[in-house]
Image (cartoon, rainbow, N blue to C red):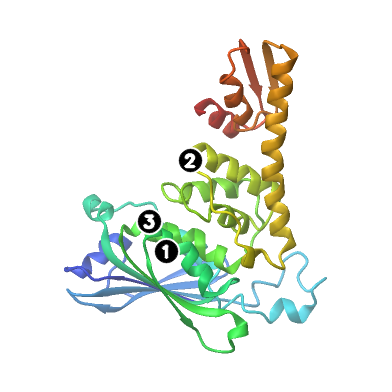
Amino acid sequence: MLLTLTLTRPPATDLRYLLHKHPDRLQSFALGFGAAQVFYPEATEARCTAALLLDLDPVSLVRGRPGAGAADGLLASYVNDRPYAASSFLSVAIAQVLGSALRGRSAHPALAEAALPLEAVVTPVRVHGGPALVRRLFEPLGYAVTVSQAGGDEAARCWTVSLAAETTMQRLLSHLYVLVPVLDDAKHYWVAEDEIDKLLRHGEGWLPGHPARELIARRYLKHRKPLARLALDRLAALDDAPGEPPDAAEETGDEEQRVVERPLVLNEQRMAAVLAALTASGAARVLDLGCGAGRLLRALLGERQFTEIVGVDASSRELDLARER
């Protein structure tokens, strides 16, 4: 899988300061699942391109891993598109190889913070949703999007995705870090609650207001419904604007995604019912056991009837969010 990053503003060789990689050297990095190389196919004053080439070892992805070759069959474990199609492996490589750029660090801070004419090309990308999904995810972020067939049968759903925008390198890499696994709709590692922190950290400044944030959260968290609900609740704490309603075509045939939507609506109904019952009871003091990010607490604060409101939760992160609310 290949990612190229191009700067078209003279002197374009400033790209080396953004990526912390010198154009005159081929650099190799050992990763837990293979190797990555960074090199510059072109480096002129007018146009400079850096390439991140990821070479996965398909045998190491399976051998010695728990459950390898079990339920899904030995052949399926070894013969698949995982070593070749851009996926969460690419996101890990971005974090490890281009970590300073992903965090916005540079010896030239003004350059790192400037909106620059940048281009990115990722190939091949396995997109569950086709070119329309690529545009749905990237165009609201200001990118001019081009999607072309990456070879083979269209049924393979492998595409070359080209993006162009005036943005910072940090934002561009953050968008790729989050959205490439969303396009692939899979991850190569177990997803736990700490994955929510990654999503919010790399989605800071753009994900809360993204019209497809619900789809992004579901896919990024591998359709784990409790995690998706928690992530969306935390996103709502950052931006109370409603997200885009689920797209009917994308939801067709995907019962699991439809199920994720229903509890979000039901939760709002429960909260309204609880608030109505508390108000009708005449209670003045309320203790919310398992208050989470404090959505009910905030609703209670709007009622003068309640003179003391206490929230308790096992998660310190959720209590921090509740305190902010």
Q: Earlier in the sequence, mark 1 or mark 2?
A: 1
Q: Position of residue 175 (x, y in %)?
A: 44, 59
Which residue in the protein does label 3 denote? 171
Q: CA distance from mark 1 to mark 3?
A: 14 Å
Which circle marks residue 239 in the picture?
2
Q: Amino acid at mark 3?
A: Arg
Q: Amino acid at mark 2?
A: Asp
Q: Quadrant of residue 63?
A: bottom right
Q: Position of residue 205 (x, y in %)?
A: 41, 47
Q: Position of residue 301 (x, y in %)?
A: 57, 20
Visible in this render: residue 260?
yes
Q: Position of residue 109 (x, y in %)?
A: 24, 50
Which circle marks residue 252 in the picture?
none
The structure residue drawn at horizontal position 46% and vertical position 48%, both measured from the top left corner, is 209
Q: What SS does tag 2 mark?
A: loop
Q: Quadrant of residue 83?
A: bottom right
Marks 3 and 2: which is nearer the front? 2
Q: Amino acid at mark 1?
A: Glu
Residue 224 is left or right of residue 172, and the answer is right
Q: What SS does tag 3 mark?
A: helix
Q: Foreground: 285 or 16?
A: 285
Q: Earlier in the sequence, mark 1 or mark 3?
A: 1
The structure residue drawn at horizontal position 69% and vertical position 52%, both measured from the top left corner, is 260
